[in-house]
Image (cartoon, helix red, strand yellow):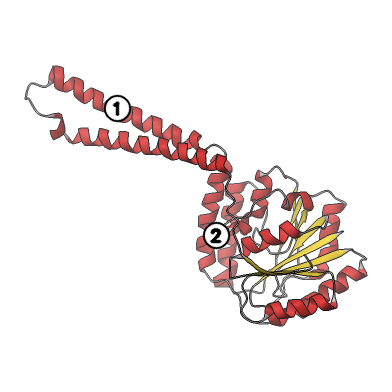
Amino acid sequence: MDVSVVIPLLNEKESLKELHDWIAKVMQSNRFSYEIIFIDDGSTDHSWETIKELSKQNKQVKGIQFLKNFGKSQALHAGFEKAEGEVVITMDADLQDNPKEIPELYNLISEQGFDLVSGWKKKRYDSVLTKNIPSKLFNWAARKTSGIKLHDFNCGLKAFKKSVIKNIELRGEMHRYIPVLAKNAGFTNIGEKIVKHQARKYGKTKYGMNRFRIGFLDLVTIWFLSRFGKRPMHLFGSLGVIMFVLGFGFALYLGIDKLFFNTTGRLITARPQFYLALATMIIGTQFFVAGFLGEVILRSNQNQNRYLIKDKLNL
């Protein structure tokens, strides 16, 4: 199969048929063998019924319905697990991503050898204050911490080699950082393509300003994971040992001072320095234990991509 189009959605009933027809037309005109995988992330507006109707009309349409809203990362993860195409395209279901970009994205992966190509909505039809400016700040911070020179990390329109999406794990809200996850997994040939952005035609956005707060927190998380995710003991253990040695050394000094140089008979526990030394040793021990537990959890390799599927189509 040439192309898998993975589309997560939440309450996008009005746009689904138009989006499907648009994608099918592009695929047929380019003679691609393809599949369209819709992941219904707990919609309440009968989006699933629309997907089932589209599946009856076109056997290339496949679907996954979640029991409730689990989030975009889990929806993409479920779609990636089922995707069979050599090139996997992700796009949003709100008609703001243009399916006419698919052939060029496909060529960038299949012919020019990119592992991942991310769309860049250079000209946006969004609110300047609530989306454009926060998005620029967010992308600047992501570039600085990850070292990946992309202008739009959170663009829903992306293209991947099949091997990329089969070797990265999405969890939490990490869909914003798929390029960073791919780089950490060893896929370093990452490109960017300017894509056309379109104004929303139906409904309203499902994301508010809160997504930028969550995005920056996730950015800190993924920076930490990329630096110390495979060796938490290197950070926490080192900090723990340093703090414990400092605290123990200071406590030893206080003991020697009490035994040999203290002529007033003042108790060690009456000196505030004693409690500083004790607190430093306790915190150092806790850091060391945190590093040890991190290593244990890392080796347990528990699957955090938990979601409950209610129904499937053609899968």
* Amino acid type, callout 1: Phe
Q: How many marks?
A: 2
Number of the label disc, if any, that sits on residue 172: none
> Mark 2 falls on what kind of element?
helix
Tell me: 312 left or right of 105: left
> Mark 1 falls on what kind of element?
helix
Q: Please report the residue visible at 72 percent of the width from the left and 58 percent of the height from the top.
A: 80
Question: To which residue does mark 2 refer?
Answer: 215
> In the rendered view of the protein, which quadrant contains the C terminus?
bottom right
* Amino acid type, callout 2: Gly
Q: Is residue 291 above or below residue 134?
A: above
Q: Please report the residue visible at 73 percent of the width from the left and 70 percent of the height from the top.
A: 97
CA separation, marks 2 and 1?
A: 40 Å
Q: Is residue 149 above or below residue 294?
A: below
> In the rendered view of the protein, which quadrant contains the N terminus?
bottom right
- Observer-nearest residue: 75 or 139? 75
Question: To which residue does mark 1 refer?
Answer: 248
Q: For residue 95, which quarter of the picture? A: bottom right
Viewer-side label of 2, 1: 1
In the image, residue 242 lies at what x, y percent? 39, 30
- Observer-nearest residue: 99 or 174? 174
Q: Please report the residue visible at 90 percent of the width from the left and 64 percent of the height from the top.
A: 32
Instruction: Specify the farthest residue to the top.
Output: 260
**Of callouts 2 and 1, which one flags the residue occurring earlier in the amino acid sequence?**
2
Kindly check if marks 2 and 1 are in contact, taking CB atoms under 8 A apart as contact.
no
Q: Is residue 98 visible in this depiction of the protein?
A: yes
In the image, residue 241 lies at what x, y percent? 40, 30
